Amino acid sequence: MPSSAGWRRRTPIVAGLVVTVLAGLALTVARHAPRPPVAPRAAIRAALHDPATARALAGSRWNRVSAAPLDAQLERVSFWAGEQIVAQAAVNGRAQVVQAQDFHAERVPYGDWIAYEPALLIGLGAIFLAVTLVVPWRRVRNLDALAAQSLVVSVVLFQRRYLDPSLVAAAPGLLYLMARCAWLALGRAPRAAPSTPLLIAVSPRMSPGRRIRWLRVALLVLGIVFVMVGVSSPFAVDVTYAVMEGATVLIHGVLPYGHLPPGILHGDTYPILSYALYTPLALIAPVRSEWNSVDAALVVAVTAALVGAWAALRSVAAGSRRNRRPDAEEAGLRAAIAVLAFPALLITVSTGTTDIVLAAMLGLALLLWRRPAAGSALLAVAGWFKLAPFALLPLFLAPLRGRRLAAGLVASAVVSLAVLALVVSLGGGRGIVEMAHAVSYQFTRGSDQSLWSALGIGGLQPLAQACVLGLIAVGALALWRDPGLADEPRRVAAICASVLIGLQLAADYWAFLYVVWVVPALCVSVLAPGIPEVPAWPVLAPADAAPATREEALAA
Protein backbone atom coordinates (compact mmCIF):
# COMPACT_ATOMS: atom_id res chain seq x y z
CA MET A 1 0.00 0.00 0.00
CA PRO A 2 1.27 3.52 -0.71
CA SER A 3 2.51 5.52 2.24
CA SER A 4 0.43 8.36 3.66
CA ALA A 5 3.05 10.86 2.45
CA GLY A 6 2.86 9.45 -1.08
CA TRP A 7 -0.92 9.61 -1.02
CA ARG A 8 -0.81 13.22 0.15
CA ARG A 9 1.45 14.10 -2.76
CA ARG A 10 -0.94 12.43 -5.20
CA THR A 11 -4.10 14.03 -3.80
CA PRO A 12 -3.91 17.19 -5.97
CA ILE A 13 -3.36 15.08 -9.09
CA VAL A 14 -6.32 12.83 -8.27
CA ALA A 15 -8.51 15.86 -7.60
CA GLY A 16 -7.40 17.42 -10.88
CA LEU A 17 -8.25 14.25 -12.81
CA VAL A 18 -11.71 14.14 -11.23
CA VAL A 19 -12.34 17.78 -12.13
CA THR A 20 -11.08 17.17 -15.67
CA VAL A 21 -13.35 14.18 -16.24
CA LEU A 22 -16.46 15.83 -14.82
CA ALA A 23 -15.83 19.13 -16.58
CA GLY A 24 -15.07 17.33 -19.85
CA LEU A 25 -18.40 15.51 -19.75
CA ALA A 26 -20.32 18.68 -18.86
CA LEU A 27 -18.62 20.81 -21.51
CA THR A 28 -19.07 18.16 -24.21
CA VAL A 29 -22.79 17.88 -23.45
CA ALA A 30 -23.25 21.66 -23.31
CA ARG A 31 -21.23 22.36 -26.46
CA HIS A 32 -23.20 23.46 -29.50
CA ALA A 33 -22.23 25.35 -32.62
CA PRO A 34 -24.01 28.64 -33.37
CA ARG A 35 -26.90 28.24 -35.78
CA PRO A 36 -26.24 30.05 -39.06
CA PRO A 37 -28.56 33.07 -39.42
CA VAL A 38 -28.59 32.53 -43.18
CA ALA A 39 -27.68 29.60 -45.40
CA PRO A 40 -23.98 29.55 -46.34
CA ARG A 41 -24.71 29.74 -50.07
CA ALA A 42 -26.97 32.74 -49.55
CA ALA A 43 -24.33 34.46 -47.40
CA ILE A 44 -21.63 33.87 -50.04
CA ARG A 45 -23.94 35.11 -52.80
CA ALA A 46 -24.73 38.27 -50.80
CA ALA A 47 -21.03 38.92 -50.18
CA LEU A 48 -20.15 38.50 -53.87
CA HIS A 49 -22.85 41.00 -54.86
CA ASP A 50 -21.80 43.57 -52.24
CA PRO A 51 -19.89 46.52 -53.78
CA ALA A 52 -17.49 46.92 -50.82
CA THR A 53 -16.62 43.22 -50.86
CA ALA A 54 -16.20 43.29 -54.64
CA ARG A 55 -13.70 46.14 -54.31
CA ALA A 56 -11.81 44.18 -51.63
CA LEU A 57 -11.61 41.12 -53.90
CA ALA A 58 -10.48 43.02 -56.99
CA GLY A 59 -7.01 41.84 -57.96
CA SER A 60 -6.71 39.49 -54.97
CA ARG A 61 -6.70 36.24 -57.02
CA TRP A 62 -8.82 34.48 -54.41
CA ASN A 63 -9.57 30.83 -55.11
CA ARG A 64 -11.52 29.65 -52.08
CA VAL A 65 -14.45 30.89 -50.03
CA SER A 66 -15.95 29.67 -46.76
CA ALA A 67 -18.93 30.67 -44.64
CA ALA A 68 -19.51 30.04 -40.95
CA PRO A 69 -21.76 31.56 -38.28
CA LEU A 70 -20.18 34.26 -36.15
CA ASP A 71 -23.17 34.22 -33.79
CA ALA A 72 -26.94 33.87 -34.04
CA GLN A 73 -27.25 37.15 -36.00
CA LEU A 74 -24.21 37.20 -38.29
CA GLU A 75 -22.58 34.89 -40.82
CA ARG A 76 -18.89 35.39 -41.64
CA VAL A 77 -17.81 34.88 -45.26
CA SER A 78 -14.04 34.52 -45.78
CA PHE A 79 -12.18 34.67 -49.08
CA TRP A 80 -8.80 32.94 -49.42
CA ALA A 81 -5.89 32.80 -51.82
CA GLY A 82 -4.52 29.43 -50.81
CA GLU A 83 -3.85 29.66 -47.07
CA GLN A 84 -3.82 33.47 -47.11
CA ILE A 85 -7.00 35.29 -46.19
CA VAL A 86 -7.70 38.28 -48.44
CA ALA A 87 -11.15 39.55 -47.41
CA GLN A 88 -14.06 38.96 -45.06
CA ALA A 89 -17.69 40.02 -45.00
CA ALA A 90 -20.26 39.89 -42.22
CA VAL A 91 -23.76 39.01 -43.46
CA ASN A 92 -26.90 39.37 -41.34
CA GLY A 93 -30.03 37.23 -41.30
CA ARG A 94 -31.56 39.24 -44.15
CA ALA A 95 -28.60 38.37 -46.40
CA GLN A 96 -27.22 41.91 -46.19
CA VAL A 97 -23.52 42.69 -45.82
CA VAL A 98 -23.04 44.85 -42.73
CA GLN A 99 -19.25 44.95 -42.76
CA ALA A 100 -16.50 44.16 -45.27
CA GLN A 101 -12.75 43.98 -44.63
CA ASP A 102 -10.01 44.17 -47.23
CA PHE A 103 -6.87 42.41 -45.91
CA HIS A 104 -4.63 42.07 -48.94
CA ALA A 105 -4.36 45.85 -49.36
CA GLU A 106 -3.18 46.40 -45.78
CA ARG A 107 0.54 46.52 -45.08
CA VAL A 108 0.09 45.15 -41.55
CA PRO A 109 -2.96 43.73 -39.73
CA TYR A 110 -2.85 46.45 -37.05
CA GLY A 111 -0.32 48.49 -35.15
CA ASP A 112 2.73 50.38 -36.42
CA TRP A 113 4.39 48.91 -39.51
CA ILE A 114 7.79 49.81 -38.05
CA ALA A 115 7.29 47.25 -35.29
CA TYR A 116 6.95 44.48 -37.91
CA GLU A 117 10.18 45.34 -39.71
CA PRO A 118 12.49 42.28 -39.88
CA ALA A 119 15.53 44.25 -38.68
CA LEU A 120 13.67 45.38 -35.57
CA LEU A 121 12.25 41.92 -34.86
CA ILE A 122 15.70 40.36 -35.25
CA GLY A 123 17.28 43.03 -33.05
CA LEU A 124 14.74 42.63 -30.26
CA GLY A 125 15.04 38.85 -30.50
CA ALA A 126 18.83 39.07 -30.15
CA ILE A 127 18.45 41.28 -27.07
CA PHE A 128 15.89 38.90 -25.57
CA LEU A 129 18.18 35.90 -26.02
CA ALA A 130 21.20 37.83 -24.74
CA VAL A 131 19.50 38.48 -21.39
CA THR A 132 17.82 35.08 -21.03
CA LEU A 133 20.32 32.49 -22.30
CA VAL A 134 22.88 30.88 -19.99
CA VAL A 135 26.04 28.83 -20.23
CA PRO A 136 26.75 25.93 -20.33
CA TRP A 137 24.45 25.62 -23.33
CA ARG A 138 22.94 22.29 -22.27
CA ARG A 139 20.48 23.81 -19.82
CA VAL A 140 16.69 23.61 -19.93
CA ARG A 141 16.62 27.36 -19.35
CA ASN A 142 17.91 27.82 -22.92
CA LEU A 143 15.07 25.69 -24.26
CA ASP A 144 12.65 27.93 -22.37
CA ALA A 145 14.11 31.06 -23.96
CA LEU A 146 14.09 29.53 -27.44
CA ALA A 147 10.48 28.38 -27.03
CA ALA A 148 9.47 31.93 -26.13
CA GLN A 149 11.45 33.34 -29.05
CA SER A 150 9.81 30.87 -31.45
CA LEU A 151 6.49 32.71 -31.07
CA VAL A 152 7.79 35.42 -33.39
CA VAL A 153 7.24 32.98 -36.30
CA SER A 154 3.50 33.12 -35.63
CA VAL A 155 3.64 36.92 -35.72
CA VAL A 156 5.38 37.00 -39.08
CA LEU A 157 2.89 34.54 -40.57
CA PHE A 158 -0.06 36.47 -39.19
CA GLN A 159 1.33 39.71 -40.61
CA ARG A 160 1.11 38.09 -44.04
CA ARG A 161 -2.42 36.85 -43.26
CA TYR A 162 -1.60 33.14 -43.12
CA LEU A 163 -4.10 32.54 -40.31
CA ASP A 164 -4.04 28.76 -39.90
CA PRO A 165 -0.25 28.44 -40.29
CA SER A 166 0.25 31.23 -37.74
CA LEU A 167 -1.91 29.36 -35.20
CA VAL A 168 -0.16 26.06 -35.82
CA ALA A 169 3.27 27.72 -35.61
CA ALA A 170 2.49 29.15 -32.16
CA ALA A 171 1.20 25.88 -30.72
CA PRO A 172 4.54 24.05 -30.07
CA GLY A 173 6.07 26.97 -28.18
CA LEU A 174 2.93 27.60 -26.13
CA LEU A 175 2.45 23.92 -25.31
CA TYR A 176 6.08 23.57 -24.26
CA LEU A 177 5.93 26.66 -22.03
CA MET A 178 2.65 25.54 -20.47
CA ALA A 179 4.05 22.09 -19.64
CA ARG A 180 7.38 23.49 -18.48
CA CYS A 181 5.72 26.02 -16.16
CA ALA A 182 3.38 23.35 -14.76
CA TRP A 183 6.32 21.03 -14.07
CA LEU A 184 8.34 23.79 -12.40
CA ALA A 185 5.41 24.69 -10.17
CA LEU A 186 3.92 21.29 -9.35
CA GLY A 187 6.78 18.83 -9.78
CA ARG A 188 9.32 17.99 -7.16
CA ALA A 189 11.51 20.84 -5.95
CA PRO A 190 13.61 21.66 -9.04
CA ARG A 191 17.23 20.52 -9.06
CA ALA A 192 18.53 22.90 -11.67
CA ALA A 193 22.13 22.54 -12.76
CA PRO A 194 24.40 25.54 -12.07
CA SER A 195 24.66 28.07 -14.87
CA THR A 196 25.96 31.54 -15.65
CA PRO A 197 23.97 34.23 -17.48
CA LEU A 198 25.27 34.70 -21.00
CA LEU A 199 25.96 38.40 -20.46
CA ILE A 200 28.26 37.60 -17.55
CA ALA A 201 29.97 34.79 -19.44
CA VAL A 202 30.83 37.03 -22.41
CA SER A 203 32.09 39.89 -20.22
CA PRO A 204 34.07 38.13 -17.47
CA ARG A 205 36.43 41.06 -16.90
CA MET A 206 33.70 43.69 -16.66
CA SER A 207 32.90 44.73 -13.11
CA PRO A 208 29.31 44.19 -11.93
CA GLY A 209 28.85 47.93 -11.43
CA ARG A 210 29.82 48.72 -15.01
CA ARG A 211 27.60 45.95 -16.39
CA ILE A 212 24.68 47.30 -14.38
CA ARG A 213 25.24 50.77 -15.85
CA TRP A 214 25.17 49.35 -19.39
CA LEU A 215 22.00 47.39 -18.61
CA ARG A 216 20.35 50.56 -17.34
CA VAL A 217 21.28 52.33 -20.58
CA ALA A 218 19.87 49.43 -22.61
CA LEU A 219 16.63 49.51 -20.61
CA LEU A 220 16.34 53.26 -21.12
CA VAL A 221 16.89 52.93 -24.87
CA LEU A 222 14.25 50.21 -25.11
CA GLY A 223 11.83 52.41 -23.19
CA ILE A 224 12.44 55.28 -25.62
CA VAL A 225 11.85 52.95 -28.58
CA PHE A 226 8.53 51.84 -27.07
CA VAL A 227 7.45 55.46 -26.57
CA MET A 228 8.41 56.50 -30.11
CA VAL A 229 6.84 53.49 -31.88
CA GLY A 230 3.83 53.05 -29.62
CA VAL A 231 2.58 56.62 -29.36
CA SER A 232 3.00 57.32 -33.08
CA SER A 233 1.18 54.18 -34.23
CA PRO A 234 -1.28 54.89 -37.08
CA PHE A 235 -3.38 51.69 -36.90
CA ALA A 236 -4.86 50.87 -33.49
CA VAL A 237 -6.71 47.57 -33.15
CA ASP A 238 -10.52 47.56 -33.07
CA VAL A 239 -10.50 46.68 -29.36
CA THR A 240 -8.93 50.07 -28.64
CA TYR A 241 -11.73 51.89 -30.43
CA ALA A 242 -14.34 49.70 -28.74
CA VAL A 243 -13.18 50.46 -25.18
CA MET A 244 -12.81 54.15 -25.93
CA GLU A 245 -16.28 54.28 -27.47
CA GLY A 246 -17.62 52.43 -24.43
CA ALA A 247 -15.86 54.86 -22.09
CA THR A 248 -17.35 57.79 -24.01
CA VAL A 249 -20.83 56.31 -23.61
CA LEU A 250 -20.19 55.68 -19.90
CA ILE A 251 -19.37 59.30 -19.12
CA HIS A 252 -22.87 60.13 -20.36
CA GLY A 253 -24.39 57.72 -17.85
CA VAL A 254 -25.19 54.92 -20.31
CA LEU A 255 -23.92 51.35 -20.21
CA PRO A 256 -22.02 50.36 -23.37
CA TYR A 257 -23.93 47.09 -23.80
CA GLY A 258 -26.11 47.52 -26.86
CA HIS A 259 -25.30 51.23 -27.14
CA LEU A 260 -22.01 51.38 -29.04
CA PRO A 261 -21.67 52.75 -32.59
CA PRO A 262 -22.18 50.08 -35.26
CA GLY A 263 -18.69 50.25 -36.78
CA ILE A 264 -17.13 47.49 -34.63
CA LEU A 265 -18.88 44.13 -34.39
CA HIS A 266 -19.45 43.07 -30.79
CA GLY A 267 -17.41 45.92 -29.36
CA ASP A 268 -19.46 45.60 -26.17
CA THR A 269 -18.35 42.06 -25.28
CA TYR A 270 -15.97 43.01 -22.47
CA PRO A 271 -16.56 43.34 -18.70
CA ILE A 272 -17.46 46.80 -17.48
CA LEU A 273 -14.00 47.81 -16.23
CA SER A 274 -12.62 47.49 -19.77
CA TYR A 275 -14.59 50.66 -20.45
CA ALA A 276 -14.74 52.30 -17.02
CA LEU A 277 -10.95 52.45 -16.59
CA TYR A 278 -10.70 54.41 -19.84
CA THR A 279 -13.26 57.07 -18.87
CA PRO A 280 -10.57 59.59 -17.80
CA LEU A 281 -9.22 59.43 -21.35
CA ALA A 282 -12.71 59.74 -22.84
CA LEU A 283 -13.28 62.91 -20.83
CA ILE A 284 -10.24 64.45 -22.51
CA ALA A 285 -10.59 62.91 -25.98
CA PRO A 286 -14.00 61.27 -26.54
CA VAL A 287 -14.26 58.63 -29.26
CA ARG A 288 -17.56 58.17 -31.10
CA SER A 289 -16.38 56.41 -34.25
CA GLU A 290 -13.30 54.97 -35.93
CA TRP A 291 -12.62 58.42 -37.37
CA ASN A 292 -11.68 59.80 -33.95
CA SER A 293 -8.17 59.66 -32.51
CA VAL A 294 -7.24 57.04 -29.89
CA ASP A 295 -3.75 58.42 -29.23
CA ALA A 296 -4.52 58.63 -25.51
CA ALA A 297 -5.10 54.87 -25.40
CA LEU A 298 -1.77 54.35 -27.16
CA VAL A 299 -0.07 56.32 -24.39
CA VAL A 300 -1.75 54.05 -21.83
CA ALA A 301 -0.49 50.96 -23.67
CA VAL A 302 3.09 52.26 -23.69
CA THR A 303 2.86 53.14 -19.99
CA ALA A 304 1.45 49.71 -19.18
CA ALA A 305 4.36 48.00 -20.97
CA LEU A 306 6.86 49.99 -18.94
CA VAL A 307 4.97 49.20 -15.73
CA GLY A 308 5.04 45.50 -16.59
CA ALA A 309 8.82 45.69 -17.10
CA TRP A 310 9.21 47.47 -13.77
CA ALA A 311 7.10 44.83 -11.99
CA ALA A 312 9.33 42.07 -13.41
CA LEU A 313 12.43 43.99 -12.33
CA ARG A 314 11.17 44.32 -8.77
CA SER A 315 9.94 40.73 -8.56
CA VAL A 316 13.18 39.16 -9.82
CA ALA A 317 15.41 41.51 -7.81
CA ALA A 318 13.45 40.77 -4.62
CA GLY A 319 13.59 37.01 -5.26
CA SER A 320 17.33 37.18 -5.92
CA ARG A 321 17.91 39.06 -2.67
CA ARG A 322 15.91 36.48 -0.73
CA ASN A 323 18.14 33.79 -2.26
CA ARG A 324 21.23 35.87 -1.34
CA ARG A 325 22.39 36.19 -4.91
CA PRO A 326 25.09 38.84 -5.37
CA ASP A 327 23.61 39.96 -8.71
CA ALA A 328 20.10 40.86 -7.53
CA GLU A 329 20.00 44.27 -9.21
CA GLU A 330 21.54 42.97 -12.40
CA ALA A 331 19.09 40.05 -12.50
CA GLY A 332 16.18 42.47 -12.15
CA LEU A 333 17.47 44.61 -15.01
CA ARG A 334 17.86 41.55 -17.23
CA ALA A 335 14.26 40.56 -16.46
CA ALA A 336 12.93 44.04 -17.31
CA ILE A 337 14.86 44.05 -20.60
CA ALA A 338 13.53 40.55 -21.37
CA VAL A 339 9.97 41.82 -20.92
CA LEU A 340 10.43 44.72 -23.35
CA ALA A 341 12.35 42.59 -25.87
CA PHE A 342 9.83 39.73 -25.69
CA PRO A 343 8.65 38.64 -29.16
CA ALA A 344 5.73 40.75 -30.43
CA LEU A 345 5.44 42.96 -27.33
CA LEU A 346 6.32 46.12 -29.27
CA ILE A 347 3.82 45.21 -31.99
CA THR A 348 1.15 44.62 -29.37
CA VAL A 349 1.88 47.94 -27.70
CA SER A 350 1.58 49.74 -31.06
CA THR A 351 -1.98 48.41 -31.43
CA GLY A 352 -3.08 50.12 -28.21
CA THR A 353 -4.87 46.94 -27.13
CA THR A 354 -6.09 46.46 -23.57
CA ASP A 355 -4.10 43.21 -23.38
CA ILE A 356 -1.03 45.30 -22.48
CA VAL A 357 -2.88 46.82 -19.53
CA LEU A 358 -3.95 43.35 -18.42
CA ALA A 359 -0.33 42.14 -18.59
CA ALA A 360 0.74 45.03 -16.33
CA MET A 361 -2.02 44.18 -13.84
CA LEU A 362 -0.94 40.54 -13.73
CA GLY A 363 2.70 41.52 -13.28
CA LEU A 364 1.78 43.79 -10.38
CA ALA A 365 -0.40 41.05 -8.85
CA LEU A 366 2.60 38.68 -8.84
CA LEU A 367 4.68 41.42 -7.22
CA LEU A 368 1.99 41.67 -4.50
CA TRP A 369 1.89 37.89 -3.93
CA ARG A 370 2.89 38.26 -0.26
CA ARG A 371 0.18 40.88 0.33
CA PRO A 372 -3.05 38.89 0.00
CA ALA A 373 -5.53 41.77 0.26
CA ALA A 374 -3.80 43.95 -2.33
CA GLY A 375 -3.00 41.05 -4.65
CA SER A 376 -6.52 39.59 -4.54
CA ALA A 377 -8.09 43.02 -5.06
CA LEU A 378 -5.90 43.67 -8.09
CA LEU A 379 -6.73 40.25 -9.55
CA ALA A 380 -10.44 40.99 -9.10
CA VAL A 381 -9.98 44.31 -10.90
CA ALA A 382 -8.13 42.47 -13.69
CA GLY A 383 -10.95 39.90 -13.86
CA TRP A 384 -13.59 42.59 -14.32
CA PHE A 385 -11.29 44.13 -16.94
CA LYS A 386 -10.76 40.87 -18.88
CA LEU A 387 -12.23 37.62 -17.60
CA ALA A 388 -9.13 35.38 -17.65
CA PRO A 389 -7.61 36.61 -14.33
CA PHE A 390 -10.58 35.19 -12.41
CA ALA A 391 -9.02 31.77 -13.10
CA LEU A 392 -6.00 32.83 -11.00
CA LEU A 393 -7.97 33.88 -7.92
CA PRO A 394 -8.21 30.29 -6.55
CA LEU A 395 -4.42 30.05 -6.82
CA PHE A 396 -3.94 33.29 -4.90
CA LEU A 397 -6.42 32.39 -2.17
CA ALA A 398 -5.58 28.68 -1.72
CA PRO A 399 -2.46 29.02 0.49
CA LEU A 400 -3.96 31.66 2.79
CA ARG A 401 -5.17 30.98 6.32
CA GLY A 402 -6.99 32.89 9.01
CA ARG A 403 -6.89 36.66 8.76
CA ARG A 404 -4.88 36.59 5.54
CA LEU A 405 -7.55 34.45 3.86
CA ALA A 406 -10.29 36.72 5.19
CA ALA A 407 -8.43 39.77 3.88
CA GLY A 408 -8.08 38.25 0.41
CA LEU A 409 -11.73 37.21 0.24
CA VAL A 410 -12.99 40.56 1.51
CA ALA A 411 -10.77 42.52 -0.87
CA SER A 412 -11.93 40.60 -3.95
CA ALA A 413 -15.55 40.75 -2.79
CA VAL A 414 -15.39 44.51 -2.22
CA VAL A 415 -14.04 45.08 -5.72
CA SER A 416 -16.72 42.85 -7.27
CA LEU A 417 -19.54 44.50 -5.30
CA ALA A 418 -18.30 47.94 -6.31
CA VAL A 419 -18.24 46.89 -9.97
CA LEU A 420 -21.76 45.45 -9.80
CA ALA A 421 -22.95 48.58 -8.00
CA LEU A 422 -21.61 50.65 -10.90
CA VAL A 423 -23.53 48.51 -13.41
CA VAL A 424 -26.76 48.67 -11.39
CA SER A 425 -26.46 52.43 -10.88
CA LEU A 426 -26.34 52.94 -14.65
CA GLY A 427 -28.63 50.20 -15.92
CA GLY A 428 -30.55 48.86 -12.95
CA GLY A 429 -30.94 45.12 -12.49
CA ARG A 430 -31.33 44.80 -16.23
CA GLY A 431 -27.80 46.15 -16.63
CA ILE A 432 -26.26 43.04 -15.09
CA VAL A 433 -28.26 40.84 -17.46
CA GLU A 434 -27.18 42.95 -20.44
CA MET A 435 -23.52 42.74 -19.42
CA ALA A 436 -23.70 38.98 -18.90
CA HIS A 437 -25.39 38.50 -22.29
CA ALA A 438 -22.84 40.67 -24.09
CA VAL A 439 -19.83 39.02 -22.41
CA SER A 440 -21.21 35.53 -23.15
CA TYR A 441 -20.39 36.13 -26.81
CA GLN A 442 -16.77 35.32 -25.96
CA PHE A 443 -17.82 31.78 -25.03
CA THR A 444 -20.25 31.09 -27.87
CA ARG A 445 -18.70 32.83 -30.87
CA GLY A 446 -17.84 31.00 -34.01
CA SER A 447 -14.25 31.58 -35.06
CA ASP A 448 -11.82 30.44 -37.72
CA GLN A 449 -8.97 31.92 -35.69
CA SER A 450 -8.41 29.13 -33.17
CA LEU A 451 -6.11 26.16 -33.05
CA TRP A 452 -9.11 23.80 -33.08
CA SER A 453 -10.55 25.11 -36.32
CA ALA A 454 -7.08 25.35 -37.90
CA LEU A 455 -6.45 21.64 -37.21
CA GLY A 456 -10.06 20.56 -37.77
CA ILE A 457 -10.33 18.97 -34.30
CA GLY A 458 -13.05 21.10 -32.76
CA GLY A 459 -14.53 18.04 -31.05
CA LEU A 460 -11.50 17.90 -28.73
CA GLN A 461 -11.83 21.48 -27.55
CA PRO A 462 -14.10 20.66 -24.55
CA LEU A 463 -11.48 18.17 -23.36
CA ALA A 464 -8.79 20.84 -23.56
CA GLN A 465 -10.97 23.27 -21.62
CA ALA A 466 -11.60 20.60 -19.00
CA CYS A 467 -7.85 19.98 -18.68
CA VAL A 468 -7.33 23.67 -17.91
CA LEU A 469 -9.96 23.48 -15.16
CA GLY A 470 -8.20 20.39 -13.85
CA LEU A 471 -4.88 22.25 -13.87
CA ILE A 472 -6.42 25.05 -11.81
CA ALA A 473 -7.73 22.48 -9.32
CA VAL A 474 -4.32 20.79 -9.07
CA GLY A 475 -2.54 24.10 -8.56
CA ALA A 476 -4.98 25.38 -5.95
CA LEU A 477 -4.92 22.14 -3.96
CA ALA A 478 -1.12 21.90 -4.17
CA LEU A 479 -0.78 25.45 -2.85
CA TRP A 480 -3.26 24.69 -0.08
CA ARG A 481 -1.50 21.47 0.98
CA ASP A 482 2.11 22.65 0.65
CA PRO A 483 2.94 25.95 2.40
CA GLY A 484 6.52 25.67 1.12
CA LEU A 485 5.29 25.94 -2.46
CA ALA A 486 3.43 29.14 -1.63
CA ASP A 487 6.66 30.61 -0.23
CA GLU A 488 8.36 30.36 -3.64
CA PRO A 489 7.07 33.21 -5.84
CA ARG A 490 8.94 31.76 -8.82
CA ARG A 491 6.87 28.57 -8.71
CA VAL A 492 3.67 30.53 -8.06
CA ALA A 493 4.36 32.64 -11.14
CA ALA A 494 4.97 29.43 -13.10
CA ILE A 495 1.56 27.91 -12.29
CA CYS A 496 -0.11 31.23 -13.13
CA ALA A 497 1.67 31.30 -16.50
CA SER A 498 0.69 27.69 -17.18
CA VAL A 499 -3.00 28.39 -16.48
CA LEU A 500 -3.02 31.54 -18.63
CA ILE A 501 -1.42 29.73 -21.56
CA GLY A 502 -3.90 26.88 -21.16
CA LEU A 503 -6.81 29.32 -21.27
CA GLN A 504 -5.49 30.79 -24.51
CA LEU A 505 -4.96 27.42 -26.18
CA ALA A 506 -8.42 26.19 -25.18
CA ALA A 507 -10.26 29.37 -26.24
CA ASP A 508 -12.49 29.87 -29.28
CA TYR A 509 -10.34 32.73 -30.52
CA TRP A 510 -6.60 33.40 -30.30
CA ALA A 511 -4.30 36.14 -31.54
CA PHE A 512 -0.63 36.69 -30.80
CA LEU A 513 -1.65 39.83 -28.89
CA TYR A 514 -2.77 37.59 -26.01
CA VAL A 515 0.73 36.20 -25.44
CA VAL A 516 1.66 39.38 -23.55
CA TRP A 517 -0.55 38.24 -20.65
CA VAL A 518 2.08 35.70 -19.64
CA VAL A 519 5.21 37.76 -20.29
CA PRO A 520 5.69 38.98 -16.68
CA ALA A 521 4.97 35.52 -15.25
CA LEU A 522 7.43 33.83 -17.62
CA CYS A 523 10.17 36.35 -16.86
CA VAL A 524 9.87 35.74 -13.10
CA SER A 525 9.50 31.95 -13.34
CA VAL A 526 11.16 29.80 -16.02
CA LEU A 527 13.25 32.74 -17.28
CA ALA A 528 14.27 33.92 -13.80
CA PRO A 529 17.86 33.42 -12.52
CA GLY A 530 18.77 29.82 -11.73
CA ILE A 531 21.46 28.31 -9.54
CA PRO A 532 24.76 30.17 -10.08
CA GLU A 533 28.00 28.52 -10.97
CA VAL A 534 30.92 29.16 -8.65
CA PRO A 535 32.47 31.58 -9.14
CA ALA A 536 29.71 33.22 -11.18
CA TRP A 537 30.48 36.88 -10.57
CA PRO A 538 33.85 38.59 -10.27
CA VAL A 539 34.62 39.78 -6.77
CA LEU A 540 36.34 43.12 -6.46
CA ALA A 541 39.85 42.41 -5.28
CA PRO A 542 41.93 45.09 -3.56
CA ALA A 543 43.56 45.86 -6.95
CA ASP A 544 40.09 46.63 -8.33
CA ALA A 545 39.28 48.97 -5.49
CA ALA A 546 39.87 52.71 -5.57
CA PRO A 547 43.63 53.55 -5.53
CA ALA A 548 44.87 54.53 -2.10
CA THR A 549 47.88 56.62 -3.20
CA ARG A 550 48.85 58.98 -6.03
CA GLU A 551 51.31 56.39 -7.38
CA GLU A 552 48.62 53.69 -7.47
CA ALA A 553 46.29 56.08 -9.26
CA LEU A 554 48.89 56.84 -11.90
CA ALA A 555 49.58 53.13 -12.35
CA ALA A 556 45.88 52.42 -12.74
Image: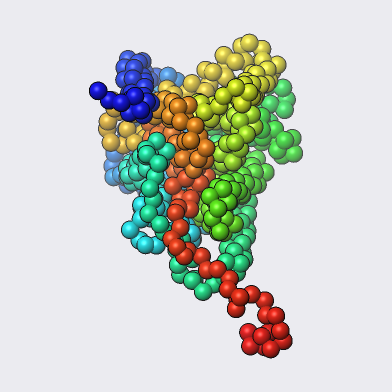
Q: Is residue 384 left or right of residue 15?
A: right
* Residue 37 % position (x, y): 39, 19
Q: Residue at x 33, y 58 (%)?
A: 138
Indicate the quadrant containing the C terminus: top left, top right, bottom left or bottom right: bottom right
Total numbered circles: 0
Q: Is residue 245 left or right of residue 125?
A: right
Q: Quadrant of residue 373?
A: top right
Q: Quadrant of residue 260?
A: top right
Q: Residue at x 29, y 39 (%)?
A: 64
* Residue 69 % position (x, y): 38, 25
* Nearest the eye: 312 or 243: 312
Extreme residue toward the right, this view: 284
* Residue 68 % position (x, y): 35, 27
Q: Is residue 360 left or right of residue 103?
A: right
* Nearest the eye: 529 or 124: 529
Q: Residue at x 63, y 10 (%)?
A: 429
The image's colouring method is rainbow
Q: Residue at x 50, y 40 (%)?
A: 488
One can see residue 212 in this view: yes
Extreme residue toward the left, this view: 1
Indicate the quadrant containing the N terminus: top left, top right, bottom left or bottom right: top left
Q: Is residue 128 above or below residue 200?
A: above
* Residue 290 % position (x, y): 60, 38
One can see residue 56 in this view: no
* Nearest the eye: 18 or 487: 487
* Nearest the eye: 525 or 217: 525
